[in-house]
Image: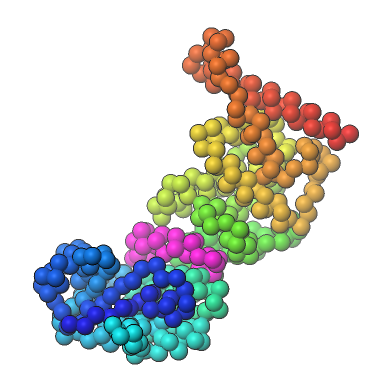
Amino acid sequence: MKIYLVGGAVRDQLLNLPIKDRDWVVVGATKEILLKKKFQQVGKDFPVFLHPKTREEYALARKDRKLGKGHTNFHTDFSSYITLEEDLIRRDLTINAIAQDKNGNYIDPYQGKKDLEHRLLRHISTSFTEDPLRVLRTARFAAQLMHLGFRVATETMFLMREIVKKKELLYLTINRVWSETEKAFKTKNPHVYFQVLYSCGALNLIFPEIYFLYQQELFFTNYLNYLNNFFLSKGLSKISTLTEDISIRFSYIFQFFSLNTNNIFKKKFYDQISASIVQNFCNRLNIPTNIKEIAILSAGFYNFLNSIKYQSSKNIVHFFCKIDAWRKPDRIKKFLFLSNFNFLHNTSQNYILNDYSDINLSPGLFLQKSFYIVRDISIKSILKKGFTGNQIKNELNRIRIKKLDLWRIKNVKKLF
């Protein structure tokens, strides 16, 4: 029995990157041998085991044979006669098919080290096309390693397009799709993930809503280009350098559904159409609630937030109620970030300032200041007046609106 370190741990070690998880492959062993050594099997039919002390994963060397459509329709052979080379060749990319023995020697039958040097994401064999998940994984690795100069090899991109043409991606479970997408959003360059999927034709198949946004001629007019010099990819790239919050990065993309030249400066409260598109997208992919809710609200209130200084105090307080800001004040910080990001990257930052400029704050800072003014109003005085039930809420909001109005009037006068 021989044990080798494999996969991402070896790759990241060679790239001098932090190693998060270590995976091992066991050659010349059986399930019974590992169980006798107190390894714990993961699942009933899959040859993966947890080490009794380190809890790291140890997998029996195996070969896979595709039986049908999708990512899971394979027959797996994990007999003790499977060689290390046979196990490594079933992997996706050469840079993930390097092994290291207990003495520190590298076993690299498919030139993974060479591809690391050349910064290439290259498939190992034509069996790459047997697993549609590899399209998403390759796109995710492109995003993960973009800062080191990696790119997808031309011949690998060709195979990715072949997988897309066969519509194999439609057989992936929503959990696997989101898992890879979430990992991509956690990288330094999540925009690269969508660019690669767009290039191989997969974006339209699995993310048609985002594909629509990439068709810039459908939603970017000359007027909007004047207002915003950052397209979808450039904006996502930039915002990802400023925050690691996935809900903010994710929400940034879907704000673009609300970009409409006919209502961008109008006092529109909520864009139900845009919000519904985002909600359907999130429901289809089972996006986690904490990310989904911010994205839906961000799309629905995009135009409202960008024109918040021209909205009534009543609408602003109503907005705080709609986003549940009283119980979840952290949402104000997220919307502040999204609003300020758009504001700071406008080519025309001072549009309509002569209309109503409330101490010349950016939309995001105005939002934050407004919330600070109304959030700490005491409910005790309201209770003393005998209000009950919904009367309490209505009176509380009336006081909030009045206080916000007084602050706005006072600060507008300061400008004259």
- In the rendering, at what x and y percent does residue 126 appear? 36, 85
- Describe residue 388's horizontal placement relative to residue 45 as left or right: right
* Residue 415 picture quarter: top right
Magenta-highlighted stretch: main secondary structure? helix
Placement of 310 over or under 39, stated as above or below:
above
Q: Residue at x 50, y 55 (%)?
A: 246
- In the rendering, at what x and y percent does residue 21 appear? 36, 68
- In the rendering, at what x and y percent does residue 8 appear? 38, 74
Placement of 95 over or under 206, stated as above or below:
below
- Describe residue 163's horizontal placement relative to residue 219 as left or right: left
Q: Residue at x 42, y 50 (%)?
A: 288
The answer to whether residue 267 is seen in the rendering is: no
- In the rendering, at what x and y percent does residue 402 appear? 69, 23
* Residue 92 picture quarter: bottom left
Q: What range is drawn magenta here?
A: 169-194
Camera-nearest residue between 275 and 365: 365
Quadrant holding the N terminus? bottom left
The answer to whether residue 233 is seen in the rendering is: yes
